[in-house]
Image (cartoon, rainbow, N blue to C red):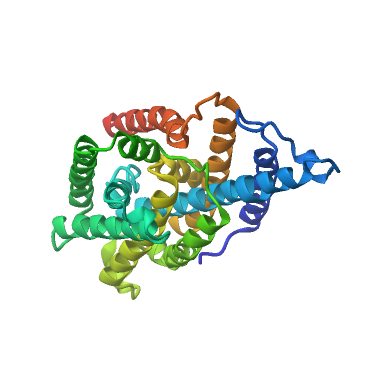
């Protein structure tokens, strides 16, 4: 892992403290279903057992998943942008998230997901792995960055069309509505078993991504320079495929298709680490967790009888940001 400067260490401490504050606010948020405050957890009352059940079985798992999902989406986006050296790269724009969603939709469509808890994450990770493998296969032997991005866009569209076919052919209206709501992204109705089910995969994915920090720093000098420094491009590529499949597959299968986090977060963090991709990985994970906690808190606060989906909130933020990024990049290219 690339060493952080003294100022960066203080920045990380400050972000972690902010995450703790945001977590407390998240746990104490009132929602349309339950109007509880965190202070009620420590007060003696006739409903104390019910209050403890709500906090420990509903709200804490939801918070932990917000932290985990935001963390892995942020780190994966940072590594993809560093590896491809393109600020528009990300797991959702390259089709990895849609491929993971397609795998999970297949499990929901055919009823595999109800047979065992691990089948939904497994099919999501399998879909993400196939998507990443296809992207690099279609990009050719030289793996030119532009060809990788174009291949990702094509696979993204193809996976989205297959998801639409699954919805169109669904004979059960209830199953179709379940798939639609799941695709919108949500962290509600999750348990500690869900947290424990995805945590090992997200942890392994993060460690693999973090091990690429020095390679990403060397890659800023060019592929030939990275090879001369002893890095094997094929091994690093395989590592990226495995890490992305594990992390994005686990995140999408548990939370649905939550877009733009992997695109927005690295851009917000990049100036803070002086545009060094190795240092960007961990910081993007922390900001990703914070972004997800804040977004889910907004979901809990503004929802009425029907809860607004988390993916809708992140898209409302990410869509305008993406347009701004395109316009800014266009102006930079137009300048002489």
Q: Nearer the viewer, residue 189 or 156?
A: 189
At 55% from the left and 37% from the top, the residue drawn is 296
Q: Is residue 40 at least partly visible in the picture? A: yes
Tell whether 109 sits left or right of 55: left
Question: Quarter of the image containing the C terminus?
Answer: top left
Q: Position of residue 37 (x, y in %)?
A: 74, 36
Q: Nearer the viewer, residue 129 or 30?
A: 30
Q: How many marks?
A: 0
Q: Nearer the viewer, residue 132 or 254?
A: 254
Q: Is residue 259 at least partly visible in the picture? A: no
Tell whether 166 sits left or right of 217: left
At 82% from the left and 41% from the top, the residue drawn is 46
Q: Is residue 208 above or below residue 255?
A: below
Q: Nearer the viewer, residue 216 or 17?
A: 17
Q: Position of residue 53 (x, y in %)?
A: 68, 48
Q: Is residue 34 above or below residue 256?
A: above
Q: Is residue 295 above or below residue 228?
A: above
- Give residue 241's quadrant in the image: bottom left
At 48% from the left and 29% from the top, the residue drawn is 308
Tell whether 212 sits left or right of 283: left
């Amino acid at each position: 892992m690339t060493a952080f400067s003294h100022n960066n260490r203080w920045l990380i401490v400050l972000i972690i403290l902010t995450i703790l504050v945001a977590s407390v606010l998240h746990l104490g948020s009132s929602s349309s279903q339950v109007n509880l405050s965190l202070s009620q957890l420590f007060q003696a009352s006739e409903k104390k057992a019910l209050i403890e059940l709500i906090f420990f079985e509903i709200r804490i798992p939801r918070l932990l998943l917000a932290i985990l999902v935001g963390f892995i989406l942020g780190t994966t986006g940072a590594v993809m942008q560093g590896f491809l050296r393109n600020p528009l790269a990300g797991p959702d724009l390259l089709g990895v998230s849609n491929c993971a969603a397609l795998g999970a939709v297949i499990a929901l469509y055919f009823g595999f997901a109800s047979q065992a808890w691990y089948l939904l994450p497994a099919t999501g990770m399998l879909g993400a792995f196939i998507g990443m493998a296809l992207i690099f296969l279609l990009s050719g032997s030289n793996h030119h960055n532009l060809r990788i991005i174009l291949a990702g866009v094509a696979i993204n569209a193809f996976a989205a069309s297959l998801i639409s076919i699954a919805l169109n052919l669904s004979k059960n209206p209830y199953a179709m509505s379940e798939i639609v709501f799941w695709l919108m992204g949500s962290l509600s109705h999750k348990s500690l078993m869900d947290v424990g089910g995805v945590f090992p995969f997200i942890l392994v994915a993060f460690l693999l991504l973090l091990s690429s920090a020095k390679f990403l720093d060397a890659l800023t000098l060019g592929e030939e320079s990275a090879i001369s420094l002893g890095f094997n491009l094929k091994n690093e590529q395989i590592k990226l495929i495995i890490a992305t499949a594990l992390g994005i597959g686990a995140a999408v299968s548990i939370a649905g298709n939550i877009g733009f986090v992997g695109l927005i977060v690295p851009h917000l963090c990049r100036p803070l680490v002086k545009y060094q991709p190795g240092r960007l990985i961990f910081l993007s994970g922390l900001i990703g967790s914070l972004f997800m906690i804040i977004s889910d808190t907004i979901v809990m606060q503004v929802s009425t009888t029907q809860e607004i989906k988390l993916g809708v909130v992140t898209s409302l933020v990410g869509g305008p940001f993406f347009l701004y990024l395109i316009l800014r990049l266009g102006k930079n290219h137009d300048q002489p």
